Image (cartoon, rainbow, N blue to C red):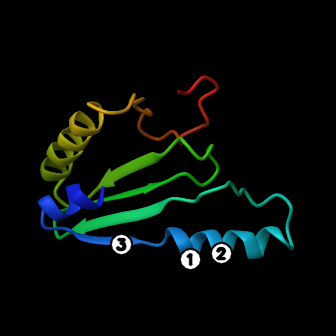
Amino acid sequence: MNQIAQENRMEFGDRSGQTQDELQNLASHEKSVPTNDQIVNVSGYRGDFSFGAGNMGLPTQQISIGFGGDDAVSAKKFADMVVQKLATKWRIHEVPHGQGALPLSKCD
């Protein structure tokens, strides 16, 4: 995602380590806090569109990516490009609009 962000002149952020620490701290007090072996929490922003990707509440090997932005046409075009690029390496499942990502029971 960092490479994709750089190719599209986006500001990239990676809070994975900080989020891992924060969740571990919360989980020590509240057992219902979702944790896994390696948290992913990254984002990219450019004036007209953005993305956020993470695996909080999902198995470590499953990542949810959301896209948005003020310019819906640019955001959709960017999302389509990212999905096409990622689909060359990984199996992609689209989550319907308005529904959150849920863990996949059979994921390789």
Q: In the rendered view, does 21 fall on the left or right side of 27?
A: left
- Name the residue tied to disc 2: 21
Query: Of marks 3 and 2, which one's residue comes earlier in the chain?
Result: 3
- Name the residue tied to disc 1: 18
Q: Amino acid at mark 2?
A: Asp
Up/down of 73 relative to 104, above or below: below
Q: Residue at x 37, y 32 (%)?
A: 90
Few, some or many C-alpha atoms within 10 Å of disc 2 (few <14, some 14-19, many ≥20)? few
Quarter of the rendering occupied by the N terminus: bottom left
Q: In the rendered view, does 102 fall on the left or right side of 65?
A: right
Up/down of 16 relative to 7, above or below: below
Label drawn at residue 57: none
Question: Could you tell me residue 83's position as x and y percent?
Answer: 27, 38
How far is disc 1 from disc 3 in space, using C-alphas? 11 Å
- Name the residue tied to disc 3: 13
Q: Residue at x 85, y 67 (%)?
A: 30
Q: In the rendered view, does 30 fall on the left or right side of 42?
A: right
